[in-house]
Image: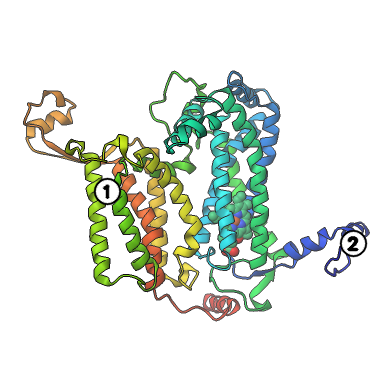
Amino acid sequence: MGHAPREGFDNPIIEWVDSRLPIFTMMQKEYGVFPTPRNFNWFWNFGAIAMFMLITMIVTGIVLAMHYTADTKLAFDSVERITRDVNGGWLLRNLHMNGASFFFIAVYIHMFRGIYYGSYKGPRELLWILGVVIFLLMMATAFIGYVLPWGQMSLWGATVITNLFSAIPFVGEQYIMPLLLGGFSIDNATLTRFFALHYLLPFVIFAVVFLHIWALHVTGSNNPLGIEPKGPQDTLPFHPYYTMKDFFGMIIFMILYAWFVFYAPDALGHPDNYIPANPLVTPPHIVPEWYFLPFYAILRAITFNFNLFMLAGLGLLAVFMVEFIWRYKPKYLSGAQGILLLVAGSGLAVFGLLADFNQTWAIPMTASTDVPISAKFGGVLAMFGSIGLLVVLPWLDSHPIRSARFRPLFRIAVLVFTLSVFILGYAGSQPSDKVYLSTCLGDAQACEAIEHGNADHIEAGHEPTVLALDNTMVAQAFTALYFSFFLIILPLLSRFEKGRELPTSIHEAVLAKKQKAGA
Ligand code: HEM
């Protein structure tokens, strides 16, 4: 088999290996002299940090697995034993438990960087999509890992989430659920298959990370300016410049991680998971781990069925979006037809929504038993859709400028989007019926009775109207904002945002910044 010409190594052992399997030549090319933009900021540390966390999780996980017992009768106690009796077991468990959180922190910052600096745009679309695949795999791994200690949240979290699959029409209840659970409820068969998958998936993630970095080394890295390097004056060799910078960033991150591991190991977890799983006692408020909260809020935000009126309305709105928002110029319809579509689509959708809430109208095809998409299945679709949108992001944002530094409106949009993800996270952590603001309109005495929880004493015909802003409404508003960012704001900005003038090259921009700082 032929191979590319290589330069020899001075060390005879390295040379012996490399002349037979040019692995050192490859490392030298990809991690030694690899030309890397000279203007990376600290955001570019998080890929390496995520890699470090992945390895930490695999190593600590393998040792934990040597002491863990995947049996519903023994799992909880085996984890307690690891923490109390196994030498260094407490450290291993704290590293693994908090490692999951820190892995997600690193990856969320890494994803934010990708969005803010437009790293998902051509030619890096596949690199980005492989990232989304990694993210999905991470979510699956973390979810099933949380079941293993067999505490109350393990059992009930898993019950809520696996139950979602029963909403899938035709196949959910009959085929997918039994396959997922290994029976009709979460039990020993579920625990053993979750353990097997929790051991397997990190290696699958590792393989996809390999492809992710391979794709990165084909296109080269993006950078804070979002312009491509034009020559050697715009780049630095990866080693020693970025090996050192990555190493430094990793140490800072590790200090923070170690602080949690040693001083607050349970701060990010839920206390109920220290109660052994009990199928007869449901915890009052089931919440997933913090890194799932925004998606959990989106899942719970869909409290209405999608009846035929709503689907027809949404269908018309989708045609409007394709014609007037996603395309540069409408292809098939005139402006007047567009307005008609918009009015008819929104009218039908709102009518369908009202009909779902007000079942006393008894309009055909709106009863929850015969709607095509139930609220539960709608929630599942919205939750997976919110991640699916990341896959098509490179095509929703087709603006020629990558970095938010040169797109003031895009920058505001990304920051508002990020804020809405945080608010969704908060909403996900609170009970659905939590009321933030409320006002009572009507009879003062009746209002007072409601305030004191004596609603039963209100005379018939004197019931006041209570307007309340509850957690579900907050989740719904910010879910709408989340989807609008991708489906409406980004396509519109791609079309209308002017953007600022780009620098001619990376090194000129770097020198100008240095001169300004020195002046
Ligand atoms: C196990 C998780 C992951 C690991 C170990 C990982 C690793 C890396 C590394 C080492 C880099 C190069 C250094 C850097 O740019 O920071 C990189 C770049 C990149 N990653 Fe990831 N990544 C992971 C997850 C993700 C996810 C979830 C996404 C997005 C959904 C993503 C999107 C990207 C993009 C777009 C780049 C190129 C950035 C640029 O050049 O500006 N990665 N990744």
Estimate the x, y position of residue 433 in percent, counting from the top left: 29, 35
Q: Is residue 209 above or below residue 340?
A: above
Q: Amino acid at mark 2?
A: Ser
Mark 1 falls on what kind of element? Answer: helix
The crowding category of the residue bearing disc 2, from other C-alpha atoms within 10 Å (few below 14, some 14 to 19, many at least 20), is: some
Q: Quadrant of the N terminus?
A: bottom right
Residue of label 1: 309
The numbered disc on residue 220 is: none
Estimate the x, y position of residue 482 in percent, counting from the top left: 38, 53
The image quadrant of residue 39 is bottom right
Residue shown at the point (61%, 25%) measured from the top left: 79
Residue of label 2: 19
Q: Amino acid at mark 1?
A: Phe
**In front here: 198 or 269?**
198
Whether residue 250 can be seen here? no
The residue at label 2 has a CB less than 8 Å from ligand 1: no
Left-right relation of 232 to 117: right
Mark 2 falls on what kind of element? Answer: helix
Q: Is residue 392 above or below residue 135?
A: below
Residue shown at the point (48%, 31%) measured from the top left: 174
Q: Is residue 45 above or below residue 33?
A: above
Left-right relation of 273 to 206: left
The residue at label 1 has a CB less than 8 Å from ligand 1: no
The image quadrant of residue 226 is bottom right
- Dot in front, 2 or 1: 1
Estimate the x, y position of residue 34 in percent, counting from the top left: 71, 67
**In front here: 51 or 208?**
208
- Number of callouts: 2
